[in-house]
Image (cartoon, helix red, strand yellow):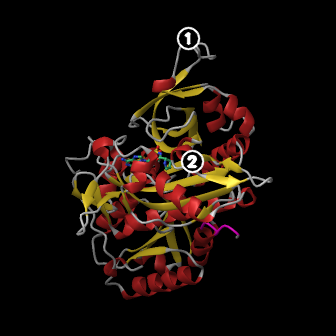
Amino acid sequence: MRLSKFFLPLLKENPVEAQIVSHRLMLRAGLIKQEASGLYSWLPLGLRVLDKVETIVSEELEKAGCVRLLMPTLQSTDLWKESGRYDALGKEMLRFNDRHERELLYSPTCEEMIVNIFRTFVKSYKQLPLNLFQIQWKFRDEIRPRFGVMRGREFYMKDGYSFHSSLEDATREYANMYDAYHAIFKRLGLTSIAVAADSGAIGGNLSHEFQVLAENGESQVYYDPAFDDIRDGKLNVTSEQMRELYAAADELHDPAKCPVPADKLRTARGIEVGHIFLLGTKYTDAMNVDVTDADGKPLRVQMGTYGIGVSRLLGAIIEASHDEGGIIWPENVAPYQVGLINMRANDEECTKAAEEIYSKLHLAGVETLYDDTDDSAGKKFAGMDLIGLPWQLVVGPRGVKSGVVELKNRKTGEKVEVSFAEAIERVSATTPKKLAA
Ligand code: P5A
């Protein structure tokens, strides 16, 4: 993409309304624009990252055996009256009437709708287990939207729902999702800790929040120091061993029952990027959902539900990966892999070299943002640092004469002078490959 043709409104000044670094950087780097409290437009650069996060979440879930579908953002309130949750979400749930005076709501979550889809089509235990998910906009009229996309009113959520013929099988799937979530967050460049949590208005008897530790997190978490060693690569544990380690959200932490001695216990702030729930029969009881068992008798269906804050993840990734200059995108979610800077757009030799490198990067399948504008070098460098692409490739008049360009790694700051061919080779070597189907 040529910057001269792109739409990248960067802000020079720190926006006053942004209290935390990720919100500030998302506004300054032209990723989002606030439209009203808790409502954001996704500008082209932000949308590219959102798409990449969505793709990774979707690929990993399909790998773990889940099947994707899509439900509408609006639904009738009838099903919520049936489930008994019509009043449970109170003012967080946005309700309104259509032209026929039928009451609708903007989905804050979709347990009722998916259960209704399930009972329409699935009649036999032989069709189980089934794990369906969507990635769709949700609306919750949060009392205090803040920190940009971190706590929005409209936000993008991955919501998954699984159906089982026994509680034992639902518990197995809960563990499967627990592992899939760790894999997802790892691929996004994040380390997550799963903490025992309260299941709130969603319900069920067992739930875990996936927390990414960050100073600006809204949650307080308590955990075994072993998690720090796992994060730092000093300790390797199996998924079963990890699930045995103590980790609890604020509301469930009980010092009297905590097996980790007080002087060893770690506490930190965290961003809740995911939340899984073992539901049991809460919704299938309320909505009367059975399948037939092997003897043709009715069998009550067991469920689990699994959420990921897809839009919130962008805030979490930036909180975990930035410096004074701006964002540092992990390769897997970077909107482009390389920023190609033509230092002298009015110099014929320079432009010829930059154009040639641009087309070779394109042929090599490397997503490139090519700054072909006639802005000053200083502005170009600051802009590239701010938007945080993994690599910067600088084409200047001096280097072009001797056939070299400067390759800068955004994360380490390391700069090397290399031939055109080597620069292209190095950048394409780190370009994320698509997951094999
Ligand atoms: C699980 C999927 C649920 O809604 N039902 C369907 C269950 N869980 S949850 O914990 O309430 O939400 C899932 C994840 O969504 C993100 N999230 C938010 N992101 C941005 N702004 C918000 N206001 C917001 N509310 C929830 C969180 O990451 C949460 O874990």
SS class, disc 1: loop
- Identify the residue shown where x is 61% and y is 13%: 261
Task: Please say if 82 is above or below 67.
Answer: above
Q: Quadrant of residue 69?
A: bottom right
Instruction: Give the main secondary structure, helix, strand or loop, of the magenta stretch.
Output: loop
Residue segment shown in magenta: 431-436
Q: Which residue is mark 2?
A: 284
Give, as a three-letter code, the residue at label 1.
Answer: Ala
The CB of the residue at mark 1 lies under 8 Å from ligand 1? no
- Assess disc 1: are there few (<14), some (14-19) or many (≥20) residues with their C-alpha within 10 Å of its C-alpha: few
Residue 412: x %, y % from top left = 52, 52
Front of the two marks 2 and 1: 2
Residue 128: x %, y % from top left = 71, 56
The front one of 97 and 40 is 97
Residue 401: x %, y % from top left = 47, 81
Residue 160 painted magenta: no
On residue 256, the disc is 1
> Is the residue under label 1 in contact with that under label 2 (CB below 8 Å)?
no
- Identify the residue shown where x is 57% and y is 47%: 284
Q: Quadrant of residue 29?
A: bottom left
Label located before the other in sequence (2 or 1): 1
* Residue 423 visible in the picture: yes
